[in-house]
Amino acid sequence: MTDLRIGHGYDVHRLVEDRKLILGGVEIPFEKGLLGHSDADVLVHAIMDSILGALALGDIGKHFPDTDERYKGIDSLKLMGYVIKLMSERGYKLVNLDATICAQRPKLSKYIEAMRQNIADISGVDISCISVKATTEEGLGFTGEEKGISATAVCLLEGKRKR
């Protein structure tokens, strides 16, 4: 019997000077980057939280605390590899993922395919299973005022139901 699980993730980071902007494992040329203990890849963080949520395993703060120096500056795709391993060890696979980045600037359309490919590669699925979109907030709120970038993600996992 099949066991389907849905997970939702959300993350936000402040934009600051003197940091690289990394989204979906892609370095994006911009005058600011995201502040965080790791590389602050807000997209990958939301995706990891969606998978951990579907598995009822908490959130990324539980697994990768910002008090642990091992994670300082780490590539978030490496952390996602650990989350994918947890998922696989529990007998689940990613069916599909839908994620949205909210950023007033920079424009992200030319980077989306590379983000999708990075996420598909680390997840072990075809790129057709990974959707990444970007939107602005029409100048409203902290993302619209360019104070930060946020991301949301929804995933569907499939596994064998255990009795």
Image (cartoon, rainbow, N blue to C red):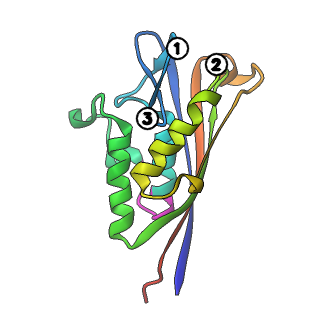
Q: Residue furthest left?
A: 70
- Is 81 contained in the magenta span? no
Q: Is residue 138 left or right of residue 112?
A: right
Q: Which residue is mark 2?
A: 105
Please state which amino acid type lies under the numbered disc 1.
Phe
Q: Secondary structure at mark 2?
A: loop
Residue at the right extreme? 138
Tell me which residue sits at (53%, 82%) in the image. Answer: 2
Crowding near pointer 1: few (<14 within 10 Å), some, many (20+)? some
Q: Is residue 53 magenta?
A: yes
What's the distance in space between the residues labelled 2 and 1, CA to CA?
9 Å
- Look at the picture and state if 91 lies above or below 155: below
- Label 1 sits on residue: 30
Image quarter of residue 141: top right
Residue picked out by circle 3: 25
Which of discs 2 and 3 lies nearer the camera? The answer is 3
Which percent across, then down, holds residue 137? Answer: 74, 27
Amino acid bearing label 3: Gly
Question: What amino acid type should be assigned to the residue bearing mark 2?
Answer: Arg
